[in-house]
Image (cartoon, rainbow, N blue to C red):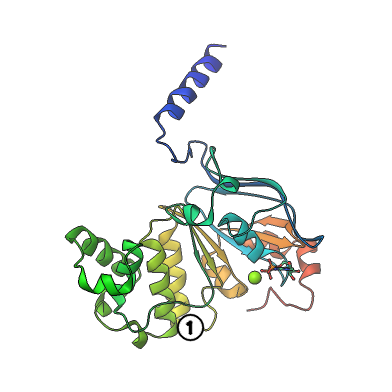
Amino acid sequence: MIDAYEESAGMGERINQLKPGQADISHGTILYLEDVTLSFDGFKALNGLNLTLDDGELRCIIGPNGAGKSTMMDVITGRRKPQQGRVFFGQNIDLLKLPEHEIANGMVGRKFQRPTVFEALGVAENIELTLTGSRSPWRMLKVRSTTTERDRIDEVLTTIGLIGLRDRPAGVLSHGQKQWLEIGMLLAQNPRILLVDEPVAGMTGEEVVRTAELLVSLAGTRTVVVVEHDMAFVRKIANKVTVLHQGSVLAEGSLTSVQNNPKVIEVYLGETPCSN
Ligand SMILES: Nc1ncnc2c1ncn2[C@@H]1O[C@H](COP(=O)(O)OP(=O)(O)O)[C@@H](O)[C@H]1O
Ligand SMILES: [Mg+2]
């Protein structure tokens, strides 16, 4: 009785300490999807999807083409709203009530497959552009960054391994380096959750290894979700793996456990997910 009382008193105190818009992650959950269904003209791209992400984890999402991976990311980022279900950031923030731009601001950063860096601008300037948000590229060239901004830019460039190229035009970067720069542009906005869609497609072997190291290093201080087809890459970084199929979770667990799951083997027949 006393324990229960103390526990509930503690919870009240904690919730009171949250600032407006701040996520309550005291239970360790950063993202919670429950029974999410999203239909396109009656076809359920997501069908009663449940997913829980722990704060700071590195999660791989795999699944055959059409499984609903991109649609799931559209829902998490607020790009599409499901017809049914609940999507919470922490315990308290209902993402279904927030517009996409608010979710992008400090909550969920999404890296699409194709890099979209500004090739004519410098490497550091690309990061600066995202830091300053509302500034147009033209104004940015005329207004000097503050020391704090420069420190932040250099910190991000160090993290992504491009500090030595800070003043080169982004156009000279290799495909892999452009992908890292784009990850840096997201990091500059300090997302709690980083979603990356097929990060290693088109990379060289060396770039793949460095991308694995980068994503592993980013987890912990933030939550990283990687959607990937390349199973050799998943094996390099995998911790917990979720397999989507027909809009819901087919299996979840270690890479070995899902690869040995008969249901997973069946949906992947002909796609050789276990090769490499
Ligand atoms: N805008 C859309 N209109 C109609 N159907 C769509 C649309 N987007 C996706 N779908 C369908 O929803 C299913 C899931 O798609 P998607 O989330 O892109 O899968 P994945 O990313 O796993 O390959 C597919 O069958 C796809 O054809
Ligand atoms: Mg997709």
Q: Which residue is mark 1?
A: 205
Q: Quadrant of residue 246?
A: bottom right
Query: Residue 268: percent from the left, percent from the top?
Result: 76, 71
**Foreground residue among 173 and 78:** 78
Evaluate whether residue 251 shows in this view: yes
Q: Amino acid at mark 1?
A: Gly
Q: Is residue 231 left or right of residue 261?
A: left
Q: Quadrant of the N terminus?
A: top right
> In terms of secondary structure, where does tag 1 sit?
helix
Q: Is residue 198 left or right of residue 206?
A: right
Q: Quadrant of the C terminus?
A: bottom right
Q: Quadrant of residue 146?
A: bottom left
At x 63% / y 73%, what residue is drawn?
A: 229
Query: Residue 67: percent from the left, percent from the top?
Result: 72, 66
Q: Quadrant of residue 209?
A: bottom left
At x 79% / y 68%, what residue is drawn?
A: 267
Query: Residue 95: percent from the left, percent from the top?
Result: 56, 47
Q: Is residue 186 left or right of residue 38?
A: left
**Foreground residue among 165 and 210:** 165
Examine the rendered structure and indicate whether residue 44 appears above or below residue 117.
above
Q: In which quadrant of this rendering is ligand 1 seen?
A: bottom right
Q: Residues within 10 Å of mark 1 (few under 14, many from 20)?
A: few
Query: Residue 60: percent from the left, percent from the top?
Result: 58, 62
